[in-house]
Amino acid sequence: MKKRWICSAAAVAISAMAAQCAYAQSSVTLYGIIDAGITYFSNLNGHGTFVANDGSIQSNRWGFLGSEDLGGGAKAIFQLENGFNLYNGTMVQSGVLFSRQAWVGLTDTTHGTLTLGKQYDFFWDNLTQFAMGQYAGQYSWHPGDFDHLAGTLHINNAVKYKSPTYYGFSFGALYAFPSQAVSAGTGRVIAFGARYDGGPFQAGVAYTDTHDLGLNGPSQAGTTLFPNLSGAPVVATSVSTIGAGASYRYGRSLTRLLFTDTHFRIAKDNGSMPTYEVNEVFQLTPATTLMGGYWYSKLGEQKFQNGTLLLDYALSKRTDVYTSATYLRVSGGAAPVFLGSGSAPVFSNGAYVGSGESSTAIRIGMRTRF
């Protein structure tokens, strides 16, 4: 009898330990992207220039993605992501180790996902997938990435909720508490988003309202934003953006449409920058992708037009080589500046002081993921 009791107790203990092991599983994944290449700019401050640069088709990064199974469909999750410059080894944002993302939270198959920390808004989550910049990178993003599609808005002090998917639909909301200093991030941020994934058809919408946001219009987009502003960086009282996008896949073709509208309020100045985009992705072979697209943007009298072609060839599942050509044309006092090109145009009374209303960026590069 005593022997049976001891065996039974041992069996119960082993069962309890097995149950704990069944759900207390955790994993941490190290991942990253490395992109490098050479770009020719036909008009970089009035001169044709070859530049060895990195992070063009996708920004260089490495990070940790972790999860712990809590049982009952719940998990504890976190992500830490650093941005870096390949050619000199420095961090993208000096003194900030995880400049792209740094958050922790809980996810549940029934109730959704709640995260806290440095995060992206819903333009990144729901609309980047419809932009030609998703394939071609920084030279094909909309002016200055004021609509956040390229992921240049890293929101500090954010609380973010994303719902489970119901019949293809999901939604989310974000609130960020103001940073103590603008240089440390942004002011208060409110954001919402929703998306639909229905087989060949996908769609998304997003809205973000950011207060006290630091902007450098000349280097970001070749504009002072408003004619009476100087070429110096400014702090916008508010920048609010609304956007919608959709795509449809048929056979080897993927057609994508995208619209965003950004409203700036800087002191007494107000203005909107709507952008309209259409692009097509075609899978020539299982390893070869061709993408072409066009967008048009307007801010007051300033007009921006961008046409991009990309050819990408996959050497393996992780590594590819690519070439792209992007033509940018501006008018109304703006300068032809590609996002992240390092150009620093000179302005007088809000108008570009320089030669040429257009520039072409031709790039050849290589990317690997790990």
Image (cartoon, rainbow, N blue to C red):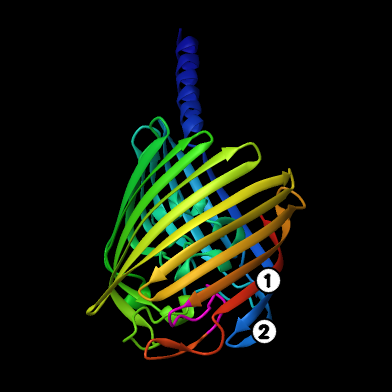
Q: Is residue 44 above or below residue 73?
A: below
- Disc 1 marks which amino acid? Ile
Judge left or right: residue 309 versus residue 206: right
Q: Is residue 100 magenta?
A: no
Dominant secondary structure (helix, strand or loop) of the stretch shown in magenta: loop
Quarter holding the C terminus?
Answer: bottom right
Q: Using the image as rendered, state which of residue 57 and residue 262 is in the foreground.
A: 262
Q: Is residue 335 magenta?
A: yes
Q: Residue at x 45, y 20 (%)?
A: 12
360 is higher (above) or lower (below) than 296: below
Corner quadrant of residue 71? top left
- Tell me, for residue 168, which label it has, or none: none
In front of the other: 42 or 124: 42
Identify the magenta region: 331-343
Label 2 vs label 1: CA separation?
11 Å
Residue 312 visible: yes
Label 2 secondary element = strand
Query: Which residue is label 2 attached to?
Result: 48
Give the tally of numbered discs.
2
Q: Is residue 39 left or right of residue 234?
A: right
| x, y percent for residue 66 | 50, 48
Farthest left residue? 268
Which kind of residue does numbered mark 2 sit on?
Gly
